[in-house]
Amino acid sequence: MCSCNFFNNFKFINSILNSSLNAATLDLLRSSVLVAISGAFRVYIASLLLDTHVSMVLCFAGGLIIYSVYTLDRTMDSEEDLINRKELYGSCKEIGFAASILSFVIGGYILAHNCLLWVALVPLVTGLLYSKGIKIGKYSLRLKGGLGVKNLIVGLSWGIFITGLACSACKHVISIIVVFILYGVKVFVNSAIDDFKDIKGDTIAGIQTLPVYFGELTTRHFLLGLHVFSHLILGIALLKGRIAFEPLILACSFLCGMFCIMRYTNEEKYMKGKAGLAIFKDGESTLIVLLSVVTDYFFV
């Protein structure tokens, strides 16, 4: 009798999992994997630029936190997401939420062990304030809304996160500021590029993103200016010895960014260029690390 009940319960649980783990749920779980890997490598590259000890454990923890925050954001439906993320419609949000919490707990434990838990809380808190906000009595605080607010929040929070993990052993303030500018601007630009695919949904929802408000051409020129400015600062810092001499990182970062801005700041081209985006935008840092390994092997 007990054995029969056990197998019945097992079949019941298995049926729930099979129904929950549909294609949309799998898309939800894997949608943030590439950006998490890229983020982990960004911490690695930032450590190289700051000429500090590269901790693979911190890079791994950073990737887990990034996965957690991005997956959590995708589990929180908003009006524009019903149009912009149709592939996630029908996914089991509970499974996505559980994966996000588990990832954050593991990553947070590693960072807490290194006295860096505060770094993980920066993107988590700002992400929650942006997506849902908080309400205390008659007062509410939500960061969503306003022209370019999302891009600014994403750039600042992830810039602080990446630099915070990489600079734990660096005492040169100027070097830290340079790396923060690089990744703060880079994440800002990438998030603005992503807005081009969401022009239709954002317009319907009444959200004034940069491409919706200014149009494609003006936004493209603005992003180009930011990109060139951040890499000019990086180049000067490299020549002045404020950061480690890593010309390959500078060149690859500049060229990948220029290619993505010129190529994908168009709604139609963005939707047709997912392979290129995966390599040169979301996978930029992975590409840089692979090129560094290859050049070190053959030329060092």
Image (spheres, rainbow, N blue to C red):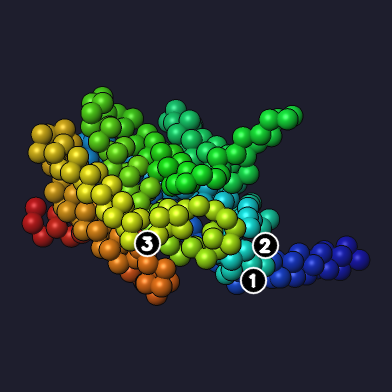
- In the picture, the quarter occupied by the N terminus is bottom right
Amino acid at dot 2: Cys
Label 2 close to label 1 by CB (< 8 Å): yes
Residue 60, given in percent of the width and then of the height, sits at: 41, 47
Find the distance from the CA under tag 2 to the CA under tag 1. Answer: 8 Å
Amino acid at dot 1: Asn
Between 85 and 40, the residue placed more toward the observer is 85
What residue did someone put label 1 on?
22
Q: In the rendered structure, find residue 92 and report the number of the disc placed on it.
A: 2
Q: In the rendered structure, find residue 179 and report the number of the disc placed on it.
A: none
Residue at x 22% of width, y 49% of height: 228
- Using the image, determine if residue 25 lies above or below residue 52: below
Mark 2 against mark 3, which lies toward the viewer? Answer: 3
Q: Is residue 283 visible?
A: no
Q: Is residue 201 left or right of residue 8?
A: left
Between 299 and 7, the residue placed more toward the observer is 299
Between 277 and 262, the residue placed more toward the observer is 262
Is disc 1 placed on a helix, strand or loop? loop
Find the distance from the CA under tag 1 to the CA under tag 3. Answer: 36 Å
Residue 95, given in percent of the width and then of the height, sits at: 65, 57
- Classify residue 26 by image quadrant: bottom right
